């Protein structure tokens, strides 16, 4: 479902001169919750989020992917943005990041350090005491640390 939604909304967001930063799908009460993160070189304000929300709601309702029962939230990734893809990590090499992992890596589940390298399989984090090669699928949450 996530890939289907991304393919549907990405061209719309690009045509509006925004970047689709990411999509989270969760649940709120008994409804599907879609959180779309958008970005632009000039930043994002509430009006930008409202415009994208209106357009995305329209296309989701027409395509009926969510069966009409969903909550849509459109947001900026913020200064402490969530890093979701290898491209996100690559954009912030030598920046500080906080990772929450799904399982232990070198007996650690939380790591704060600098992004040192990115490749197709993992991101390299240096926390001043050790270097970690962390596979993307082991990351539960990653945020820039400001």
Image (cartoon, rainbow, N blue to C red):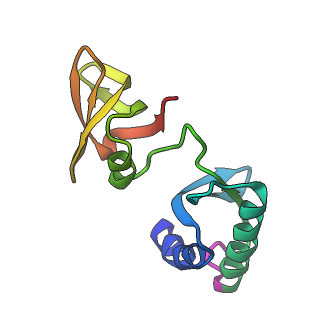
Quadrant of the rendered structure where residue 39 is?
A: bottom right
Taking the magenta stretch, the answer to whether it contains residue 83 is no
Left or right of 106 on screen, residue 68: right
Residue sitting at x 30%, y 20%: 127
Residue sitting at x 57%, y 74%: 9
Quadrant of the rendered structure where residue 42 is?
A: bottom right
**Of the pair 18 and 131, the residue shown nearer to us:** 18
Q: Residue furthest bottom?
A: 62
**Magenta stretch secondary structure, dominant:** loop
Q: Is the residue 106 above or below the residue 121 in the image?
A: above
Residue sitting at x 72%, y 73%: 57
Q: Is the residue 58 above or below the residue 23 in the image?
A: below
* Total number of numbered discs in the rendering: 0
User: Percent from the top left, x then y, of residue 105?
Assistant: 26, 27
User: Percent from the top left, x then y, of residue 129?
Assistant: 25, 14
Q: Residue furthest front?
A: 42
Q: Magenta region: which residues?
A: 63-67
Residue sitting at x 73%, y 80%: 58
Left or right of 132 on screen, residue 17: right
Quadrant of the rendered structure where residue 8 is?
A: bottom right
Q: Is the residue 114 above or below the residue 6 in the image?
A: above
User: Percent from the top left, x then y, of residue 54?
Assistant: 76, 73
**Of the pair 69 and 114, the residue shown nearer to us:** 114
């Amino acid at each position: 479902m996530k890939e289907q939604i991304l393919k549907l909304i990405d061209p719309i967001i690009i045509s509006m001169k925004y970047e689709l930063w990411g999509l989270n799908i969760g649940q709120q009460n008994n409804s599907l919750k879609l959180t779309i993160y958008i970005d632009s070189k000039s930043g994002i304000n509430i009006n930008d989020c409202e415009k994208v929300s209106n357009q995305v709601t329209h296309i989701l309702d027409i395509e009926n992917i969510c069966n009409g029962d969903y909550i849509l939230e459109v947001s900026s990734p913020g200064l402490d943005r969530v890093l979701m893809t290898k491209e996100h990590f690559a954009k912030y090499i030598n920046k500080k990041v906080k990772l929450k992992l799904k399982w232990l890596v070198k007996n650690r589940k939380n790591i704060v350090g600098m992004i040192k390298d990115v490749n197709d399989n993992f991101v390299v984090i240096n926390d001043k005491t050790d270097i970690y090669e962390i596979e993307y699928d082991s990351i539960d949450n990653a945020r820039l640390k400001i």
